[in-house]
């Protein structure tokens, strides 16, 4: 069984003398519905009081 987030799970039979494995993953229907996520700015958390005090020394 081969599975990956956003792709359909596949069951592949490996033969006894098989040396290589080529597989092509198909997108899951949920990924088509979700679309792509775009981030315009990076989130930066605020420093706590302890981090500010620690930065002085």
Image (cartoon, rainbow, N blue to C red):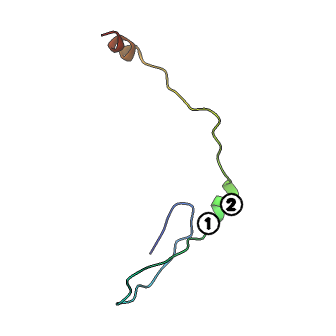
Residue drawn 48% across the image and 68% down it:
3
Q: Residues within 10 Å of mark 1 (few under 14, many from 20)?
A: some
| Of the pair 3 and 56, the residue shown nearer to us | 56
- Quadrant of residue 32 within the rendered picture: bottom right
Residue denoted by label 1: 28
- Relative to 3, 19 lies left or right: left
Q: Secondary structure at mark 1?
A: loop
Number of numbered discs on residues: 2
Give the alpha-carbon distance from disc 1 to disc 2, as whole Å. Answer: 7 Å
Residue drawn 55% across the image and 74% down it:
24
Q: Quadrant of the N terminus?
A: bottom left
Q: Say which mark, if any, is on residue 49.
A: none
| Of the pair 47 and 40, the residue shown nearer to us | 40
Residue drawn 68% across the image and 54% down it:
35
Q: In the image, is residue 51 above or below residue 42?
A: above
Residue drawn 61% across the image and 32% down it:
41
Q: Quadrant of the C terminus?
A: top left
Q: In the image, is residue 36 above or below residue 2?
A: above
Residues at circles 1 and 2 in contact by the CB criterion of under 8 Å: yes
Q: Residues within 10 Å of mark 2 (few under 14, many from 20)?
A: few
- Quadrant of residue 19 within the rendered picture: bottom left
Residue denoted by label 2: 32
Q: Position of residue 2 (x, y in %)?
A: 46, 72
**Extreme left residue here?**
57
Q: Secondary structure at mark 2?
A: helix
Q: Position of residue 22 (x, y in %)?
A: 49, 78
């Amino acid at each position: 069984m081969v599975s990956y987030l956003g792709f359909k799970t596949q069951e592949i039979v490996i033969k006894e003398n098989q040396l290589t494995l080529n597989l092509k993953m198909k997108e899951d229907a949920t990924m088509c519905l979700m679309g792509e996520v775009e981030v315009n700015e990076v989130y930066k958390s605020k420093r706590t009081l302890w981090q500010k005090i620690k930065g002085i020394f």
